[in-house]
Amino acid sequence: MSTDMSQNTLQEISDAGVSIWLDDLSRDRLHDGSLEKLISNSHVVGVTTNPSIFSAAIAKSSLYQADILDMASKGYSTIEIVTQLTTDDVRNACDLFAPTFVSSSGVDGRVSIEVDPELAYDTSATVSRGKYLWSVVRRPNLLIKVPATMEGLPAIEELTAQGISVNVTLIFSVERYRMVMDSYLRGLERRVTNNLPINQIHSVASFFISRIDSLVDEQLDASSPASVLRGKAAIANAHLAYEAFLKVTSSARWSKLASNGANFQRPLWASTGVKDKAYVSTKYVVELVADNCVNTMPENTLNELRANGIVRGDTITANFDQAREVLKDLAQAGIDFDYVVRHLETDGVGKFEKAWKELLNNVSTVTHPNEVAQ
Protein backbone atom coordinates (compact mmCIF):
# COMPACT_ATOMS: atom_id res chain seq x y z
CA MET A 1 0.00 0.00 0.00
CA SER A 2 1.40 3.41 -0.86
CA THR A 3 2.25 5.96 1.80
CA ASP A 4 -0.57 8.21 0.62
CA MET A 5 -3.11 5.40 0.83
CA SER A 6 -1.89 4.24 4.24
CA GLN A 7 -2.01 7.74 5.63
CA ASN A 8 -5.54 8.04 4.26
CA THR A 9 -6.62 5.22 6.56
CA LEU A 10 -5.51 7.18 9.59
CA GLN A 11 -7.09 10.32 8.16
CA GLU A 12 -10.37 8.48 7.56
CA ILE A 13 -10.48 7.18 11.13
CA SER A 14 -9.83 10.68 12.43
CA ASP A 15 -12.39 12.25 10.10
CA ALA A 16 -14.98 9.72 11.30
CA GLY A 17 -14.68 11.16 14.80
CA VAL A 18 -12.13 8.84 16.42
CA SER A 19 -9.14 10.42 18.13
CA ILE A 20 -6.04 8.23 17.77
CA TRP A 21 -4.05 8.09 21.00
CA LEU A 22 -0.86 6.10 21.52
CA ASP A 23 -0.88 3.62 24.39
CA ASP A 24 2.80 4.07 25.17
CA LEU A 25 5.31 6.57 26.49
CA SER A 26 8.99 6.45 27.29
CA ARG A 27 11.91 8.83 27.69
CA ASP A 28 13.41 7.27 24.57
CA ARG A 29 10.32 8.29 22.55
CA LEU A 30 10.64 11.82 23.86
CA HIS A 31 14.37 12.03 23.11
CA ASP A 32 14.60 10.33 19.74
CA GLY A 33 11.73 12.22 18.13
CA SER A 34 9.61 9.13 17.46
CA LEU A 35 6.62 10.47 19.39
CA GLU A 36 6.88 13.81 17.64
CA LYS A 37 6.95 11.96 14.32
CA LEU A 38 3.77 10.06 15.19
CA ILE A 39 2.09 13.37 15.99
CA SER A 40 3.23 14.87 12.71
CA ASN A 41 2.70 11.91 10.39
CA SER A 42 0.26 9.44 11.98
CA HIS A 43 -2.61 11.53 13.36
CA VAL A 44 -1.67 10.69 16.96
CA VAL A 45 -3.33 13.30 19.16
CA GLY A 46 -2.81 11.91 22.67
CA VAL A 47 -1.02 9.39 24.87
CA THR A 48 -2.07 7.02 27.62
CA THR A 49 0.26 5.46 30.16
CA ASN A 50 0.01 2.86 32.90
CA PRO A 51 2.41 1.14 35.31
CA SER A 52 3.17 -1.60 32.77
CA ILE A 53 4.25 0.96 30.19
CA PHE A 54 6.54 2.79 32.60
CA SER A 55 7.94 -0.44 34.01
CA ALA A 56 8.97 -1.55 30.52
CA ALA A 57 10.31 1.90 29.63
CA ILE A 58 12.57 2.15 32.67
CA ALA A 59 13.75 -1.47 32.42
CA LYS A 60 14.75 -1.12 28.75
CA SER A 61 16.31 2.34 28.71
CA SER A 62 19.55 3.81 30.05
CA LEU A 63 18.13 7.33 29.94
CA TYR A 64 16.68 7.06 33.44
CA GLN A 65 19.73 5.78 35.31
CA ALA A 66 21.50 9.07 35.96
CA ASP A 67 18.36 10.63 37.40
CA ILE A 68 17.65 7.56 39.50
CA LEU A 69 21.16 7.54 40.99
CA ASP A 70 21.08 11.30 41.57
CA MET A 71 17.78 11.17 43.43
CA ALA A 72 18.86 8.13 45.42
CA SER A 73 22.01 9.99 46.52
CA LYS A 74 19.76 12.77 47.83
CA GLY A 75 17.75 10.35 49.92
CA TYR A 76 14.66 9.95 47.74
CA SER A 77 12.64 6.82 48.41
CA THR A 78 11.92 4.39 45.56
CA ILE A 79 8.33 5.59 45.22
CA GLU A 80 9.49 9.23 45.21
CA ILE A 81 11.94 8.43 42.42
CA VAL A 82 9.25 6.65 40.40
CA THR A 83 6.89 9.57 40.88
CA GLN A 84 9.44 12.08 39.66
CA LEU A 85 10.52 9.99 36.66
CA THR A 86 6.98 9.36 35.49
CA THR A 87 5.66 12.87 36.12
CA ASP A 88 8.67 14.35 34.32
CA ASP A 89 8.00 12.18 31.27
CA VAL A 90 4.29 12.98 31.32
CA ARG A 91 4.92 16.70 31.72
CA ASN A 92 7.31 16.68 28.76
CA ALA A 93 4.76 14.76 26.70
CA CYS A 94 2.08 17.29 27.68
CA ASP A 95 4.34 20.04 26.38
CA LEU A 96 4.89 18.16 23.13
CA PHE A 97 1.12 17.87 22.68
CA ALA A 98 0.44 21.49 23.64
CA PRO A 99 -0.19 22.63 20.03
CA THR A 100 -2.70 19.78 19.57
CA PHE A 101 -4.34 20.72 22.84
CA VAL A 102 -4.75 24.31 21.73
CA SER A 103 -5.89 23.54 18.18
CA SER A 104 -8.52 21.05 19.43
CA SER A 105 -9.80 23.46 22.11
CA GLY A 106 -8.67 21.09 24.83
CA VAL A 107 -10.37 17.98 23.49
CA ASP A 108 -7.17 16.23 22.43
CA GLY A 109 -3.48 16.73 23.08
CA ARG A 110 -4.06 14.79 26.29
CA VAL A 111 -1.59 12.70 28.30
CA SER A 112 -2.71 10.36 31.09
CA ILE A 113 -0.98 9.31 34.28
CA GLU A 114 -2.39 6.69 36.60
CA VAL A 115 -3.00 6.88 40.33
CA ASP A 116 -1.02 4.13 42.09
CA PRO A 117 -2.94 0.86 41.47
CA GLU A 118 -2.61 -0.20 45.11
CA LEU A 119 -5.08 2.62 45.92
CA ALA A 120 -7.82 1.23 43.65
CA TYR A 121 -10.08 0.32 46.57
CA ASP A 122 -9.37 3.42 48.69
CA THR A 123 -11.46 6.45 47.74
CA SER A 124 -9.78 9.10 49.89
CA ALA A 125 -6.26 7.96 49.02
CA THR A 126 -7.14 7.99 45.32
CA VAL A 127 -8.42 11.54 45.59
CA SER A 128 -5.31 12.67 47.49
CA ARG A 129 -2.94 11.01 45.05
CA GLY A 130 -4.86 12.36 42.06
CA LYS A 131 -4.66 15.90 43.42
CA TYR A 132 -0.96 15.47 44.11
CA LEU A 133 -0.16 14.20 40.61
CA TRP A 134 -2.21 17.03 39.10
CA SER A 135 -0.25 19.59 41.13
CA VAL A 136 3.12 18.05 40.28
CA VAL A 137 2.65 17.78 36.52
CA ARG A 138 0.98 21.22 36.38
CA ARG A 139 -0.30 20.99 32.83
CA PRO A 140 -3.88 21.65 31.70
CA ASN A 141 -3.77 18.80 29.17
CA LEU A 142 -3.12 16.16 31.83
CA LEU A 143 -5.64 13.43 32.62
CA ILE A 144 -5.53 11.64 35.97
CA LYS A 145 -6.34 7.93 35.53
CA VAL A 146 -8.68 6.51 38.15
CA PRO A 147 -9.97 2.90 38.08
CA ALA A 148 -13.73 2.38 37.78
CA THR A 149 -13.95 0.32 40.96
CA MET A 150 -16.87 1.02 43.27
CA GLU A 151 -14.43 2.93 45.46
CA GLY A 152 -13.18 4.80 42.42
CA LEU A 153 -16.61 6.20 41.53
CA PRO A 154 -16.79 8.80 44.34
CA ALA A 155 -13.15 9.67 43.64
CA ILE A 156 -14.09 10.46 40.03
CA GLU A 157 -16.86 12.74 41.25
CA GLU A 158 -14.63 14.47 43.80
CA LEU A 159 -11.70 15.05 41.45
CA THR A 160 -14.07 16.38 38.80
CA ALA A 161 -15.70 18.65 41.37
CA GLN A 162 -12.24 20.00 42.16
CA GLY A 163 -11.64 20.89 38.53
CA ILE A 164 -9.36 17.98 37.65
CA SER A 165 -9.74 16.18 34.32
CA VAL A 166 -10.01 12.41 34.72
CA ASN A 167 -9.43 9.36 32.56
CA VAL A 168 -11.53 6.58 34.09
CA THR A 169 -9.85 3.24 33.46
CA LEU A 170 -10.68 -0.47 33.75
CA ILE A 171 -14.32 -0.27 32.65
CA PHE A 172 -15.70 -3.60 31.46
CA SER A 173 -19.48 -3.44 31.80
CA VAL A 174 -22.12 -1.08 30.43
CA GLU A 175 -23.70 -0.94 33.88
CA ARG A 176 -20.47 0.28 35.47
CA TYR A 177 -19.96 2.69 32.58
CA ARG A 178 -23.33 4.30 33.35
CA MET A 179 -22.17 4.73 36.94
CA VAL A 180 -18.94 6.30 35.72
CA MET A 181 -20.85 8.79 33.59
CA ASP A 182 -23.09 9.60 36.55
CA SER A 183 -20.03 10.27 38.71
CA TYR A 184 -18.64 12.66 36.11
CA LEU A 185 -21.95 14.50 35.81
CA ARG A 186 -22.32 14.72 39.58
CA GLY A 187 -18.89 16.32 39.82
CA LEU A 188 -19.80 18.86 37.15
CA GLU A 189 -23.14 19.57 38.80
CA ARG A 190 -21.44 20.31 42.11
CA ARG A 191 -19.26 22.90 40.40
CA VAL A 192 -22.25 24.51 38.71
CA THR A 193 -24.05 24.67 42.05
CA ASN A 194 -20.99 26.40 43.53
CA ASN A 195 -20.77 28.83 40.58
CA LEU A 196 -17.48 27.34 39.43
CA PRO A 197 -16.54 26.97 35.75
CA ILE A 198 -16.73 23.58 34.07
CA ASN A 199 -15.70 24.43 30.51
CA GLN A 200 -12.03 23.51 31.06
CA ILE A 201 -12.78 20.05 32.46
CA HIS A 202 -12.53 17.11 30.08
CA SER A 203 -12.80 13.39 30.69
CA VAL A 204 -12.62 10.05 28.94
CA ALA A 205 -14.00 6.69 30.06
CA SER A 206 -11.69 3.83 29.11
CA PHE A 207 -13.72 0.79 28.10
CA PHE A 208 -11.54 -2.32 27.78
CA ILE A 209 -12.06 -4.44 24.69
CA SER A 210 -9.79 -7.38 23.85
CA ARG A 211 -9.67 -8.79 27.37
CA ILE A 212 -13.39 -9.46 27.18
CA ASP A 213 -13.06 -11.58 24.05
CA SER A 214 -10.09 -13.42 25.52
CA LEU A 215 -12.06 -14.60 28.54
CA VAL A 216 -15.36 -15.22 26.76
CA ASP A 217 -13.65 -17.12 23.94
CA GLU A 218 -11.86 -19.27 26.49
CA GLN A 219 -15.20 -20.18 28.05
CA LEU A 220 -16.79 -20.80 24.66
CA ASP A 221 -13.90 -23.05 23.63
CA ALA A 222 -14.41 -25.14 26.75
CA SER A 223 -18.09 -25.73 26.02
CA SER A 224 -18.63 -25.10 22.32
CA PRO A 225 -15.41 -25.32 20.27
CA ALA A 226 -15.51 -23.28 17.05
CA SER A 227 -18.59 -21.40 18.25
CA VAL A 228 -19.82 -18.70 15.85
CA LEU A 229 -19.94 -16.40 18.88
CA ARG A 230 -16.15 -16.34 19.28
CA GLY A 231 -14.80 -12.82 19.00
CA LYS A 232 -18.18 -11.11 19.15
CA ALA A 233 -18.62 -10.29 22.83
CA ALA A 234 -16.21 -7.35 23.15
CA ILE A 235 -17.46 -5.42 20.13
CA ALA A 236 -21.11 -5.95 21.10
CA ASN A 237 -20.40 -4.80 24.64
CA ALA A 238 -18.62 -1.67 23.39
CA HIS A 239 -21.43 -0.87 20.96
CA LEU A 240 -23.92 -0.89 23.83
CA ALA A 241 -21.57 1.30 25.85
CA TYR A 242 -21.67 3.85 23.05
CA GLU A 243 -25.47 3.65 23.02
CA ALA A 244 -25.39 4.48 26.75
CA PHE A 245 -23.13 7.44 25.98
CA LEU A 246 -25.61 8.73 23.38
CA LYS A 247 -28.51 8.40 25.81
CA VAL A 248 -26.72 10.37 28.51
CA THR A 249 -25.55 13.11 26.17
CA SER A 250 -29.04 13.55 24.72
CA SER A 251 -30.69 13.84 28.15
CA ALA A 252 -32.14 16.95 29.76
CA ARG A 253 -29.61 16.54 32.54
CA TRP A 254 -26.75 16.79 30.06
CA SER A 255 -28.34 19.70 28.20
CA LYS A 256 -28.34 21.74 31.40
CA LEU A 257 -24.66 21.02 31.95
CA ALA A 258 -23.83 21.69 28.30
CA SER A 259 -25.46 25.10 28.60
CA ASN A 260 -22.88 25.81 31.30
CA GLY A 261 -20.00 24.74 29.05
CA ALA A 262 -19.67 21.04 29.91
CA ASN A 263 -17.52 18.83 27.71
CA PHE A 264 -18.31 15.22 26.85
CA GLN A 265 -16.79 12.39 28.79
CA ARG A 266 -15.83 10.58 25.61
CA PRO A 267 -15.77 6.78 25.42
CA LEU A 268 -12.21 5.58 24.96
CA TRP A 269 -11.57 2.12 23.53
CA ALA A 270 -8.62 0.59 25.39
CA SER A 271 -6.88 -2.77 25.13
CA THR A 272 -7.41 -2.65 21.37
CA GLY A 273 -4.47 -4.76 20.31
CA VAL A 274 -5.71 -8.11 19.00
CA LYS A 275 -4.62 -10.99 21.23
CA ASP A 276 -6.07 -13.83 19.13
CA LYS A 277 -4.09 -13.93 15.89
CA ALA A 278 -7.05 -15.59 14.17
CA TYR A 279 -8.75 -12.19 14.19
CA VAL A 280 -8.14 -9.30 11.81
CA SER A 281 -5.38 -7.20 13.33
CA THR A 282 -7.41 -3.98 13.11
CA LYS A 283 -10.66 -5.50 14.42
CA TYR A 284 -10.82 -3.45 17.60
CA VAL A 285 -10.31 -0.21 15.72
CA VAL A 286 -12.37 -0.42 12.53
CA GLU A 287 -15.36 -2.00 14.31
CA LEU A 288 -15.42 0.79 16.89
CA VAL A 289 -15.74 3.90 14.76
CA ALA A 290 -18.21 6.65 15.63
CA ASP A 291 -18.18 10.33 16.48
CA ASN A 292 -16.66 11.50 19.78
CA CYS A 293 -14.63 8.35 20.44
CA VAL A 294 -11.00 7.81 21.36
CA ASN A 295 -9.01 4.70 20.49
CA THR A 296 -5.75 4.27 22.37
CA MET A 297 -3.53 1.67 20.76
CA PRO A 298 -0.01 0.28 20.92
CA GLU A 299 2.22 1.28 18.02
CA ASN A 300 2.04 -2.15 16.36
CA THR A 301 -1.75 -1.79 16.13
CA LEU A 302 -1.31 1.71 14.73
CA ASN A 303 1.06 0.30 12.12
CA GLU A 304 -1.42 -2.45 11.22
CA LEU A 305 -4.15 0.16 10.88
CA ARG A 306 -1.95 2.27 8.65
CA ALA A 307 -1.00 -0.68 6.44
CA ASN A 308 -4.11 -2.86 6.40
CA GLY A 309 -7.02 -1.00 7.94
CA ILE A 310 -10.25 -0.82 5.95
CA VAL A 311 -12.37 2.02 7.25
CA ARG A 312 -16.12 1.72 6.69
CA GLY A 313 -17.21 4.88 8.48
CA ASP A 314 -19.49 4.60 11.51
CA THR A 315 -19.56 0.93 12.52
CA ILE A 316 -21.40 1.39 15.82
CA THR A 317 -24.67 3.28 15.71
CA ALA A 318 -26.52 0.95 13.33
CA ASN A 319 -25.63 -2.12 15.38
CA PHE A 320 -27.21 -1.64 18.80
CA ASP A 321 -29.96 -4.23 18.27
CA GLN A 322 -27.47 -6.68 16.84
CA ALA A 323 -25.24 -6.17 19.86
CA ARG A 324 -28.12 -7.02 22.19
CA GLU A 325 -28.73 -10.20 20.21
CA VAL A 326 -25.08 -11.22 20.56
CA LEU A 327 -25.17 -10.84 24.33
CA LYS A 328 -28.46 -12.73 24.45
CA ASP A 329 -26.96 -15.55 22.40
CA LEU A 330 -23.92 -15.64 24.67
CA ALA A 331 -26.16 -16.00 27.72
CA GLN A 332 -28.00 -18.87 26.04
CA ALA A 333 -24.63 -20.46 25.32
CA GLY A 334 -23.91 -20.45 29.05
CA ILE A 335 -21.71 -17.37 29.30
CA ASP A 336 -22.23 -15.53 32.59
CA PHE A 337 -21.33 -12.03 31.45
CA ASP A 338 -21.69 -10.59 34.94
CA TYR A 339 -19.00 -13.00 36.09
CA VAL A 340 -16.82 -12.07 33.12
CA VAL A 341 -16.81 -8.34 33.88
CA ARG A 342 -16.37 -8.84 37.65
CA HIS A 343 -13.45 -11.16 37.07
CA LEU A 344 -11.82 -8.83 34.55
CA GLU A 345 -12.04 -5.84 36.88
CA THR A 346 -10.40 -7.73 39.75
CA ASP A 347 -7.83 -9.22 37.39
CA GLY A 348 -7.14 -5.82 35.81
CA VAL A 349 -6.45 -4.17 39.14
CA GLY A 350 -4.23 -7.10 40.08
CA LYS A 351 -2.24 -6.86 36.86
CA PHE A 352 -1.64 -3.15 37.34
CA GLU A 353 -0.63 -3.74 40.97
CA LYS A 354 1.88 -6.35 39.80
CA ALA A 355 3.22 -3.96 37.16
CA TRP A 356 3.50 -1.21 39.79
CA LYS A 357 5.63 -3.49 41.99
CA GLU A 358 7.77 -4.38 38.98
CA LEU A 359 8.21 -0.67 38.28
CA LEU A 360 9.39 -0.08 41.85
CA ASN A 361 11.71 -3.07 41.53
CA ASN A 362 13.18 -1.82 38.26
CA VAL A 363 14.12 1.45 39.95
CA SER A 364 15.33 -0.25 43.09
CA THR A 365 17.68 -2.51 41.15
CA VAL A 366 19.49 0.58 39.86
CA THR A 367 20.00 2.04 43.33
CA HIS A 368 20.45 -1.26 45.18
CA PRO A 369 21.49 -3.91 42.63
CA ASN A 370 21.44 -6.71 45.21
CA GLU A 371 18.07 -5.84 46.72
CA VAL A 372 14.44 -6.03 45.58
CA ALA A 373 11.88 -3.32 46.34
CA GLN A 374 9.03 -4.39 48.59
Image (cartoon, grey):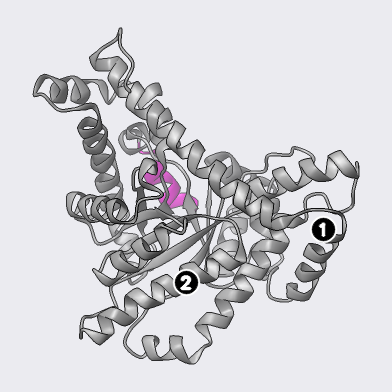
Q: Amino acid at mark 1?
A: Leu
Indicate the secondary structure of the residue bearing disc 1: helix
Residue 346, compared with residue 102, is above or below; it is: above
What range of the chain is rendered magenta? 33-42
Determine whether the residue tagged by mark 2 lies in a helix, strand or loop.
Answer: helix
Residue that numbered label 2 is attached to: 181
Question: Do we see residue 124 in this rendering?
Answer: yes
Where is residue 88 drawn, in percent x and y? 23, 41
| 139, 30: nearer the viewer | 139
Look at 82% across and 58% down and name the residue there. Answer: 330
Name the residue at 31% across, 71% down: 201
Q: How many marks?
A: 2
**76 and 340: which is toward the camera:** 340
Quarter of the rendering containing residue 265: bottom left
Instruction: Please state, as top left, top right, bottom left or bottom right, where the C terminus lies in the image.
Output: top left
Image position of 322 (left or right of 128): right
Between 217 and 16, the residue placed more toward the observer is 217
Residue depicted at x 39% and y 86%:
258
Tell me if residue 311 can be seen.
no
Establish if 297 lies above or below 196.
Answer: above
Identify the image quadrant of residue 203.
Answer: bottom left
Give the residue at x 60% y 44%.
Answer: 301
| Position of residue 204 measured from the top left corner of the image (x, y, whole percent) | 44, 64
Left or right: residue 266 compared with residue 79: right
Q: Main secondary structure of the magenta part?
A: helix
The type of residue carrying mark 2 is Met
Badge 2 vs badge 1, beta-carbon distance below 8 Å:
no
Q: Is residue 299 left or right of residue 102?
A: right
Label 1: few (<14), some (14–19) or many (≥20) C-alpha neighbours in 10 Å: some
| Residue occupied by mark 1 | 330
Front residue (pair 33, 299): 299
